[in-house]
Image (cartoon, rainbow, N blue to C red):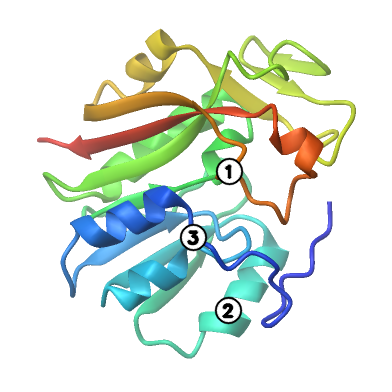
Amino acid sequence: MTFDLTPGALPEPSAHVLARDLAARVSAPRRILVVGYGSGRNLAPLLDAGLAIDLCEGDVTRAAAAAQRYGASSRVRIFTALGSPYATTSIVPDCDGALSTHALLHGNAAGLATSIASIHGRLRDGAPFYTTLGSTRDPRFGRGLRIDAATFAPDTGTEAGVPHVFLSEREVRAMLRDFTIESLDEIDASEHVGAWAHEPEDAATIVHWFLRARRDG
């Protein structure tokens, strides 16, 4: 899929609820790891809260869009992850929070586990991690091209051919075993997904896990 991500062409200014919640939780001038740029909608509340951002984006087009929009900001550092999983070149616990509202929905189960481990390695003790993950209650689970037991690429709709990882509650908790899970909610995500990437009829059926966790120890 190709989207117009140039400044001024973004159709969705509203940040994800998890981005707003994390911005309210972490006090400036701390640093947040953001995994996945998307349309860029989630950076504004973090910057408005006075936070610094390490942005990790594996897609070169989106990374370039982020650089065009935020490259002059002294509070935004942009890292290009080489493919999947998302990871910076070194794992140093220097971030006071982490956010990913869409990037960890994609890829495959093994890559997701590696990405979560990388995020854990970037966080200081006690730092929160807010993310969305795919749910096995999503009607796309088990349909389309099977990549592995948890991963399927739909063959219709706006995300045809894009691999999605779907997890049960037990699988989410196992994958986040190195974190303390504060809340885990399985919800209809139609009002929270990126409208820039989904047609309304596709968005209406999406089910996500909303996860709020923290690194302890």
Q: Earlier in the sequence, mark 3 or mark 1?
A: 3
Q: In which quarter of the image is residue 153?
A: top right
Dot 3 amino acid type: Ala
Observer-side mark, 3 or 1, equals: 1
Q: Position of residue 132 (x, y in %)?
A: 47, 36
Whole-Å distance between the Cαs marked 1 and 2? 28 Å
| Residue with the mark numbered 2 | 67
Q: Residue at x 12, y 35 (%)?
A: 216
Q: Residue at x 53, y 63 (%)?
A: 14
Q: Where is residue 94 in the image (x, y as percent from the top left)?
A: 21, 59
> Vertically, is 119 above or below 71?
above
In this picture, residue 57 sits left or right of residue 148: left
Residue 195 in view of the camera: yes
Whole-Å distance between the Cαs marked 3 and 2? 19 Å
Dot 2 amino acid type: Ala
Q: Which of 102 and 116 is in front in this view?
A: 102
Q: Residue 15 carries which label?
A: 3
Q: Residue 191 carries which label?
A: 1
**SS at mark 2?**
helix
Task: Say how many tags the image has.
Answer: 3
